[in-house]
Amino acid sequence: MASAVVTKGLRHLARSFGRQTHFLTASRRLVQSLPKMQKLMENYCPNVSRPIVKKTNHPFIILVEGNIGSGKTTFLKQFEHLPNATVIPEPVNRWTAVGGQHNLLQLMYEEPKKYALALQTYIQLTMLQNHRHPVTTEFKLMERSLHSARYCFVENLFRSGVLSEVETLVLDEWFQHLITAEAAACKADVAVYLRTDPEVALRRIQLRARESEKTVGLDYLRSLHELHEEWFLKQSYFPLPCERIVCIDANQTADIVRDEFYRQMSRFNINPQHRLTKQGCNTINED
């Protein structure tokens, strides 16, 4: 069957080319004949597998990471009116209204040993839902991730003795399962680390005066800062969430941080400042 197909194909080429010997003319006619040859193969060899072209709507995912008070929310707000992106904020309003009435975040700050496991379990759930949230835009910007929840916040609770070893093992096993089972949803293209001095972060926290953060102190921020440094800069223990990392001095004003983000993204031949100008930006409403 295969030889018959080849023979028929050669006859087709012979009819197409005749006695032409000019290379460019022959090449042009060969290219023109390819669709006919493909049709011929499909007719005579229907079982021959065809190349699969996978179409994907996977957006370009940017994780925005950093300490409490590092300016993540302010940074993301600058994208809310830009086109062709979806901004997904950290679901803090869910952590502060579990069942519509329980401020689990504040309870954890007030009684860490009692509520840390419950909060971190709920954070894993809500962050996974953010990772899985489908978008139709070219860019998806997420405030924090499952990765930072485990590598910074759970790790800090364990090192400080708030979470026991067995509680940490349970959370870690859940985390490893989620990032494996939901690998496609949890992948990212770029992680932005908003690097902020703990003292600067504390001043910002005090200025915004959120009720759930009133007990956050400088020692806690310093511990979280060191874990972010270990993760993104020293890379001494935990794996990075993706290959491309953008580290920005976030002690500066929001405009400077944004411009530095655009500048560093150009290292990857990505210009979101230009590309985010098409259709309109969406912000997920976390009601």
Image: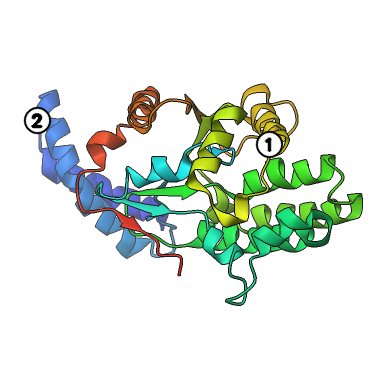
Q: Position of residue 273 (x, y in %)?
A: 27, 35
Q: Which residue is mark 1?
A: 224
Q: Residue at x 60, y 63 (%)?
A: 95
Dot 1, crowdedness within 10 Å: few (<14), some or many (≥20)? Answer: many
What count of labels does the image hold? Answer: 2
Q: Amino acid at mark 2?
A: Thr
Q: Amino acid at mark 1?
A: Leu
Please state which of residues 169 and 158 is positioned toward the viewer in this rendering. 158
Dot 2, crowdedness within 10 Å: few (<14), some or many (≥20)? Answer: few
User: In the image, which is nearer the foreground, mark 1 or mark 2?
Assistant: 1
Q: Which residue is mark 2?
A: 25
Q: Is residue 90 above or below residue 236?
A: below
> Alpha carbon of mark 1 to alpha carbon of mark 2: how far?
68 Å
Q: Position of residue 226 (x, y in %)?
A: 69, 29
Q: Residue at x 37, y 25 (%)?
A: 260
Quadrant, the C terminus: bottom left
Q: Is residue 148 above or below residue 230?
A: below
